[in-house]
Each structure stands twice: as structure tokens, then as C-alpha cells.
Image: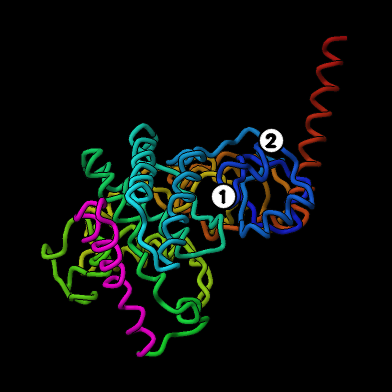
Amino acid sequence: MRRMPITDKVIGKYAAKTIYGRNQRIPLVREGTMIRPSMLETMRRQGITWVWVLDSLFPDLYVREAVKNETLEVARKSLEDTFQLVQMDQRPSEKRAADLVASVQAMVEDIISNRDVVANVSHLRVWDNYTFEHSVHVAILTAIIAKHLKMTPDQMTRIGVGAILHDIGKLMVPQEILQKPATLTPEEMDVIRQHPVLGWDLVHEGFSSIMPTSSIVVRQHHERLDGSGYPDGRKGDDIYLFSRIVAAADVFDALRAERAYRPVYTPRRILQTIREETGPKLDPRAVEALLTHVAIIPEGEIVRLTNGLLGMVVTTNPGYALQPVVQVVADDRDQPVEREMLDLKETPVEVDCVLDDWPELVEERVAARMSRHSDAGSTEATAIGD
């Protein structure tokens, strides 16, 4: 399986995971169903931007993520309901807040039960709302960090609630500023820098059943160890531990995303940037737990290596963020080669970039080569049997 953007290329592919829309209870496309043009249009109208599909070259590869698909969809729905109420200037009810906490608790339970040393946390944006999807991702990343810092399930839930609500103040920021495809002016930056305080006010005053520690995270997630952060310029241990953990998850997920004002960063640049921020700005323990236990390049990604070879990530290596195990299928000219399982931690080769799809004709060429080998094998087996 692999992830694919919602384009005409997904028509005829088979969904590898059930795809839900805004009404979480009714699937748009069920797992194993062929995606048809009408389904594609429905997904586009629902704002879905990426899907998991079965890959013809790796039909047996299944990517297990840190949080189950069903759990994730419930959390998405609960958060969307909460965001909608805030945008309508309404306070969430006790039940709504309790539902949100319960959805985070369910994610925490999935993460605790996941025995993988390195977790796959897909960076694909399923719905076309950056703040919304980013919030869900940061909650997952935060809970993983908390798990490996030996926090209790209750602590993981409290920090997870703060993480999923950390950017709620951005709902009060004008969209033309949030989505501006250029550098913000100093005045616009001042507006952006208000979102932690706006979020604190919303959560602290409007979510009476949300734990106070969670609302502190909302206010402090942009504070930095050297005092360069905002809104209060706190330093070091004066920043709540939960807030320092969410800050690391927030930066990591933001670096993985395509933004209106910059293209997607390469895995190497993501790693380099977060390493540079560690110590002076980000908590070293939180970052180390993140980079050790979350894959920068998750399984199922199509990758081009620094030596030009093309393949798919099939396993991740703890502590080797840019050097997973890759099954190579084509050379640097996109010509099929004998399949080779390449453990990059045993070589000087690294992942150079992640691709959205196989390059043109590669899938066709490799599939044809596989078919020829299969036919040859069948012929040989028949001859032996005769």
C-alpha cells in the first residue's frame, strides 16, 4: 500500500483503508473498494486530499500506524465539532468537551498498545484544513513522546488534550493572514503571535471540564528554552514540561507539511532543522524521544535515494532517521532492476527525497518485468513437473 494525493490517478486503484468524510459514521469508500470517478468527486467535495491505496508493486505491504483508522476518525470528528462551535462563537457543552477528551484517551490507548519501536505517523493531510489536521497530528506525536518519557496514561491524556487544542486560537486569526503565500509583515506576525493567548482564553474560560494543565499547553506551546518564544518570553524550566513536549511535536509536524509560503522540506532538512533547534530552543529529551520513536520517513513511502535508486520504505530503523530499509525496484534512470532489500544503515546511502507517486511509466515497467519473471517461473515449474 501507499499514500496518493486525490487526483485522477487514484481512479481504478483500490482503497487500502476505509475513507471517511465529514459525517464520520458513513464511509465514502470502504477498504478494498475500487475508486471510481464518482467517488473521487465526492472525496474532493468533502475536502479529502490524500488516500491510502493498494500498490501493485507492493500488494502485501500494510502500513500500521500508531493510531487505528477508526480511532483517528472519531478524534477528527470530535475536534471538527469543537472547532465549528468556536467559529460560531459558542462554548462547547460539557458533553462536547468530554467527547473530545474521550477521543484523545482512545488515541492514547492505541499508542500504549502499539509495540512498534518506531511508530508510523503519516504526515498526509486527509482534510484540506491545515490547522485542523496539524492539531490531530501534534496530539499523536505528543502522546508518543510522553509514552517514551514514561508518563502515565492519565498524563498522556492530559498532554494530548492540550496538544489537540494547542492551535485553537488560530480560529480567531483572519484566514488571509494564516494562508498568506508570502512572508508576513511585522504587523501580521503580531496578529499570529496572539493565538496562544486567544486559545488560552477560549480553553480556560470556555472548557470548564478540560484539565487546567491542558490549557497551560495552549498558552505556552510557542515558548522556547532560550526565552525567544512567545507570548510571555518564558525560559528553561519556567516553561511547563507538557508545553515543552508539545512544542517539539508542533515544530516537527510543521516542518513535514507543505505550506502556502514554502515547499515541502526534504527529510534531511527536517532532521537538520529540528536538530539545530534542540537545546537552545527545544527540549532535548522530548526531541530525542520523538526522533527515536517516530519515523521521519514512514513505511509505505516512495523514495529516491542519494545514489539515484528508486524504491519503497518497508521498515524503519530506530536511531537512523534517514536510513530505513528500502526495497529497490528501479535505477537512477527509472529502469526496472532486480528487487533488492537495502538496509540503508549498513551503507553510506540515505533517502534523498520522498515522492508522491511512482515516476511516469515506472509502475508499468516494473509490473511488466514482474509478470515476465512470474511467467518464466511457471514455465520452469511445468517443465520440471513434466
**Residues at circles 2 and 1 in contact by the CB criterion of under 8 Å:** no
Q: Secondary structure at mark 1?
A: loop
Q: Residue at x 37, y 65 (%)?
A: 168
Residue 108 shows up from this direction: yes
Q: Secondary structure at mark 2?
A: loop
* The quarter of the displayed image where residue 280 is located: bottom left
- Viewer-side residue, 113 vs 188: 188
Q: Residue at x 64, y 53 (%)?
A: 4
Foreground of the two, 185 or 228: 185
In the picture shown, does residue 384 fall above or below 252? Answer: above
Q: What amino acid does circle 2 point to?
A: Gly
**Rendered residue at 35%/61% (across/down):** 91
Q: Quadrant of the N terminus?
A: top right
From this view, report whether residue 229 is shown above or below residue 80: below
Q: Which residue is mark 2?
A: 32
Q: Position of residue 166 (x, y in %)?
A: 33, 62
- Per the image, the residue denoted by label 1 is 301
The residue nearer to you, when weighing 107 against 14, is: 107
- The dominant secondary structure in magenta is helix
Q: Residues within 10 Å of mark 2 (few under 14, many from 20)?
A: some
Magenta stretch bounds: 187-216
Position of residue 65 measured from the top left corner of the image (x, y, whole percent): 47, 41
User: Which tag is nearer the camera, tag 2 or tag 1?
Assistant: 2
